[in-house]
Image: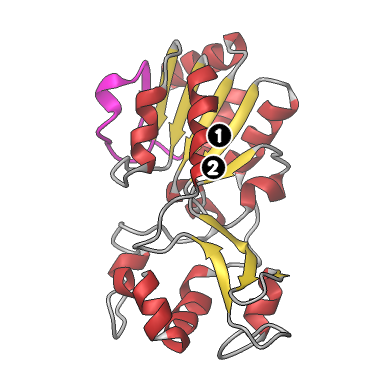
């Protein structure tokens, strides 16, 4: 492992255009559960399967039930950035990191200080009225139960991508452009099983592909460097 950390450190030093692509595993070290592990969201015992609850159809037809689950399971307003978030913010501060591309909706990259963050699945911190378009913050969603209603009387919807909904095309385009410009692509905390997001790896034309994940992924065989360990620990040690 020491040799792999050393190699990662060398890659970081020699790189000038790093892009990071991360998934739920980046935020588990901040106390936010992932989706597919034994203790993840999809294995929680609810009246409906979590995948069903987090769908556009369910939001439309069972809105109160959706918001009950959403507040209990998806919102972590007190979560703080961990070593992975902080290391990436520092790389951007040094002028080495072009962008963070994340599947997470928690906003922890921005909280750590990252400026260029492409949120593929949206953010819990952005919410909008479906009638007039007025914007609301996370606290309003937490405080206004059972349904968060706008001052105009319209229903407020979180700006997160639910099942059956398309990813934002501008976010996808920005992500593809950043990956295509990168000399190093670091992928961390993701199983690379969720499409279309996982397909972004195909746009990388750079030198070093680094994968950091606790378990194996379909992308391991393509990687310049593959490390199966905690992403916060790995990035902190490599930055040191």
Relative to residue 15, is residue 78 depicted above or below?
Answer: below
In the rendered structure, which segment of residues is drawn in magenta? 213-230
The residue depicted at 69 percent of the width and 78 percent of the height is 140
> Magenta stretch mostly in which secondary structure?
loop
Residue positioned most to the front? 132
Helix, strand or loop for disc 1: helix
Residue 13 counted in the magenta span = no
- Residue 182 in percent (x, y) is at 53, 18
| Label 2 crowd (10 A; few <14 / some 14-19 / many >=20) | some
Name the residue carrying label 2: 171
Q: Is residue 177 visible?
A: yes
Residue 224 counted in the magenta span = yes
- Residue 46 in percent (x, y) is at 31, 82
When asked about the image quadrant of residue 227, the answer is top left
Q: Relative to 168, is 79 on the left or the right?
A: right
When asked about the image quadrant of residue 98, the answer is top right
Relative to residue 191, is residue 106 depicted above or below?
Answer: below
Name the residue carrying label 1: 174
For the residues bearing labels 2 and 1, Cβ distance under 8 angstroms? yes
Q: Relative to 11, is 125 on the left or the right?
A: right
The residue depicted at 39 percent of the width and 70 percent of the height is 56
């Amino acid at each position: 492992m020491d040799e792999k950390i050393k190699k990662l450190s060398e890659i970081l030093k020699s790189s000038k255009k790093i892009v990071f692509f991360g998934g739920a595993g980046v935020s588990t070290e901040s106390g936010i559960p992932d989706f597919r592990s034994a203790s993840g969201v999809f294995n929680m015992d609810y009246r409906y399967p979590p995948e069903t609850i987090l769908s556009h159809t369910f939001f439309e037809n069972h809105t109160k039930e959706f918001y009950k689950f959403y507040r209990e399971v998806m919102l972590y307003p007190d979560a703080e950035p961990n070593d992975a978030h902080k290391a990436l913010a520092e790389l951007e501060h040094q002028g080495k990191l072009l962008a963070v591309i994340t599947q997470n909706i928690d906003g922890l990259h921005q909280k750590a200080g990252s400026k260029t963050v492409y949120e593929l699945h949206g953010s819990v911190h952005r919410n909008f009225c479906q009638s007039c378009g007025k914007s609301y913050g996370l606290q309003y969603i937490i405080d206004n139960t059972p349904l968060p209603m706008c001052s105009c009387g319209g229903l407020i919807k979180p700006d997160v991508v639910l099942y059956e909904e398309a990813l934002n095309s501008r976010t996808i385009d920005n992500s593809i452009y950043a990956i295509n410009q990168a000399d190093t692509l670091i992928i961390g905390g993701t199983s690379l099983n969720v499409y279309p997001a996982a397909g972004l790896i195909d746009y990388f034309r750079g030198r070093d592909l680094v994968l950091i994940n606790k378990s194996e992924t379909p992308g391991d065989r393509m990687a310049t460097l593959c490390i199966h360990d905690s992403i916060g620990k790995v990035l902190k040690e490599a930055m040191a």
